[in-house]
Amino acid sequence: MYVITGATGNTGKRISHALLDAGKQVRVIGRSAERMQEFADKGADVFVGDLNDRAAMEKAFNGATAAYVMVPPKYDAEDFRAYQNEVNESLANALEKSQVKHVVALSSVGAELPSGNGPVAGLYDMEQRLNKLDEVHILYLRPGYFMENTMMQIGTIKAMGFAGTPVKPDATFGMIATQDIAAYAVKRLLALDFTGHSHQELQGNRDLSYAEVTKLYGEKIGKPDLEYVQVTPEQALQGMMQVGMSQSAAEMMLELSEGLNTGEVHPLEPRNDENTTPTTIEQFAEYWTAAYNAS
Ligand SMILES: NC(=O)c1ccc[n+]([C@@H]2O[C@H](COP(=O)([O-])OP(=O)(O)OC[C@H]3O[C@@H](n4cnc5c(N)ncnc54)[C@H](OP(=O)(O)O)[C@@H]3O)[C@@H](O)[C@H]2O)c1
């Protein structure tokens, strides 16, 4: 049986559906039975529980032989990294007490760094903690920047008339559609072909800059002159806190932007067939544009 954390999220939802469609026994974990009804309809075992509830997670992982684990962001956490570490500890404890032999864990590019990488530092902590599980085969996926992050620009464009983040317009890095992360995770979860503790980078289809992405999106929405503005850290902090982020979470996000600007957060491998994923930004732009037009 496969246990899937974050089952209603970007990656977990697709992974859960794919494993169920492949006829596998699946237990989905989330905080709402209603949001997981679509999996129950396909025969999944639905487990309602909080990832940082250790007793609940021990039960949730009991009886499973493989798992997909991830640490969901909690943007209003007073101490973002401490929250990530509560989840890390709860997941590690549940895995230790379970029969799970294979784990695909969602990490990130930059997770080899203990600091200077914002929220990715909590994924460094996750890898360090899970690496103590000698008996469990763990494949850490290290994807780049999610294309889905650019969905946040819809609100900025509608409110301010420009796209903007603290990332430099010409800083280039791999952007990946979460459907490609899910597809890769499914491939490895079905094959269970990994041993020991290993990593797989997923760098997206090609490296992109916010300037290039904004130009493309602008053309799609009939605003070919749409501007991308690198906002100041102060403006970004204020904006993030206005939408409910804690200071700790907002500061982490700023740190990550700086890591992308300086190149400190970067893949360790050259591009190759295995770490380059299929979805292009032009394909993702169709989805982005539909959401823009519907909002
Ligand atoms: N954004 C990026 O560019 C990027 C890049 C690399 C790595 N990452 C990493 O990717 C991960 C996020 O992956 P994702 O986008 O697939 O996740 P996601 O869409 O944020 O989904 C997470 C799911 O987890 C569930 N959840 C949240 N808090 C929970 C809790 N306390 N207990 C149980 N379930 C909880 C939520 O479902 P319910 O509300 O239904 O419970 C939610 O649907 C993070 O670890 C992030 O650091 C992100």
Image (cartoon, grey):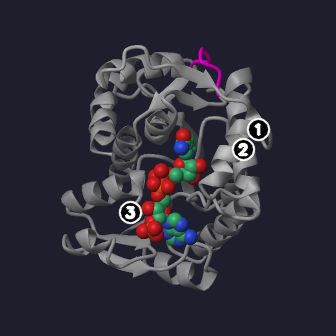
Q: Nearer the viewer, mark 3 or mark 1?
A: 1
Q: Position of residue 54 (x, y in %)?
A: 62, 80
Amino acid beneath label 3? Thr
Q: Position of residue 225 (x, y in %)?
A: 42, 14
Q: Residues within 10 Å of mark 3 (few under 14, many from 20)?
A: many
Q: Is residue 81 above or below residue 174?
A: below
Q: Position of residue 237 (x, y in %)?
A: 72, 44
Q: Residues within 10 Å of mark 2 (few under 14, many from 20)?
A: many
CA–CA distance between discs 1 and 2?
A: 5 Å
Q: Position of residue 40 (x, y in %)?
A: 25, 75
Residue behind mark 1: 234
Q: Nearer the viewer, mark 3 or mark 2?
A: 2
Q: Earlier in the sequence, mark 3 or mark 2?
A: 3
**Residue drawn 50% across the image and 73% down it:** 99
CA–CA distance between discs 3 and 1?
A: 33 Å
Asked if residue 203 is among those painted magenta in the image, a careful observer would answer no
**Residue drawn 44% across the image and 72% down it:** 30
Residue behind mark 2: 237
Question: What quarter of the picture does the N terminus occupy?
Answer: bottom left
Evaluate whether residue 49 shows in this view. Answer: yes
Residue 35, by quadrant, is bottom left
Amino acid beneath label 1? Glu
Residue behind mark 3: 8
Q: Residues within 10 Å of mark 1 (few under 14, many from 20)?
A: few
Left/right placement of residue 78 relative to residue 175 reads: right
Residue 171, by quadrant, is top right
Q: Which residues are magenta?
A: 167-172
